[in-house]
Image (spheres, helix red, strand yellow):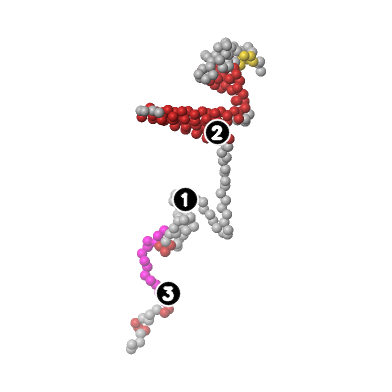
Amino acid sequence: MAAKRKSSPAGKGAGKDNPLPVDMYAGESEAVSRGRAVVNASVSSVLVMEAFNANLLGPDASLGEMSASLRKLMDECKAGKLDGIEEMLIGQAVALQTVFTSLARRASRQEYQRNYEAFLSLSLKAQAQSRATIQALVELKFPRTTVIAKQANVANGPQQVNNGAAVPAPGAVVGEAARVDGGKAPTELLEDQSHGGTYMDTRAATAPAGSHPAMATLAAINRAAKH
């Protein structure tokens, strides 16, 4: 791999007295190096931080030191060390809580309802963001674990456990053996089971037949002459 060297300052706000180092390969033009730096996460983040830094610590804060500190934090996160991220979330949660308190106090001093509602709405938004930051911190410290448990049906004796209702296939005949768990049995007295079906018997009723023809009533010609 070609050796690297530090180039001139990158970014609009960076100057000669406060340079932002950009990695350059030997024999590479400065335009190419700056083009690659545009998509670099640490460089782009430092440029945004530099734009909002004037009202914090002044314009003299070292951009090179900011970039080095940010890269160190990124390397620690990639290595699984999240102490810096945890500290950042704690600081953000406390800062948002401070914003909530300040805006809520200002809302209480307003005389007009419009101003009161505006400050109170902003304060509640800051409070919600503080709560979300705390929740993110808790999930980072104590990740949720997914538990996949298989159901075990244990029965004593010849017992069948149905976990779901069986759905018959289209056109299938539903009989006694295919009833779903919890369903009602069909009225068997009205069914014809002669051909294995479970449909209702709609045939006309037949005349009763005697069970013992040998004991039938005697014909008229065999009766006694006197009663």
Question: Could you tell which of marks 1 and 2 lies nearer the N-terminus?
Answer: 2
Q: Nearer the viewer, mark 3 or mark 1?
A: 1
The residue that mark 2 highlights is: 137
Query: Vertically, is 124 above or below 183?
Result: above
Question: Relative to residue 89, is residue 184 drawn left or right?
Answer: left
Does the segment drawn in magenta span residue 199?
yes
Residue 146 horizontal/vertical position (percent): 56, 41
**Amino acid type at image mark 1:** Val
Secondary structure of the residue carrying tag 1 is loop
Q: Nearer the viewer, mark 3 or mark 2?
A: 2
**Amino acid type at image mark 3:** Ser
Q: Quadrant of the N terminus?
A: top right
Q: How far apart in space, not on screen, are marks 3 and 1 (Cα)?
A: 45 Å
Disc 2 packing (10 Å; few <14; some 14–19; many ≥20): some
Residue at 48% from the left image edge and 55% from the top image edge: 181
Residue 177 horizontal/vertical position (percent): 49, 57
The residue that mark 1 highlights is: 167
The residue that mark 3 highlights is: 211
**Amino acid type at image mark 2:** Leu
Disc 1 packing (10 Å; few <14; some 14–19; many ≥20): few
The secondary structure making up most of the magenta span is loop
- Give the magenta-colored segment's residue range: 198-213
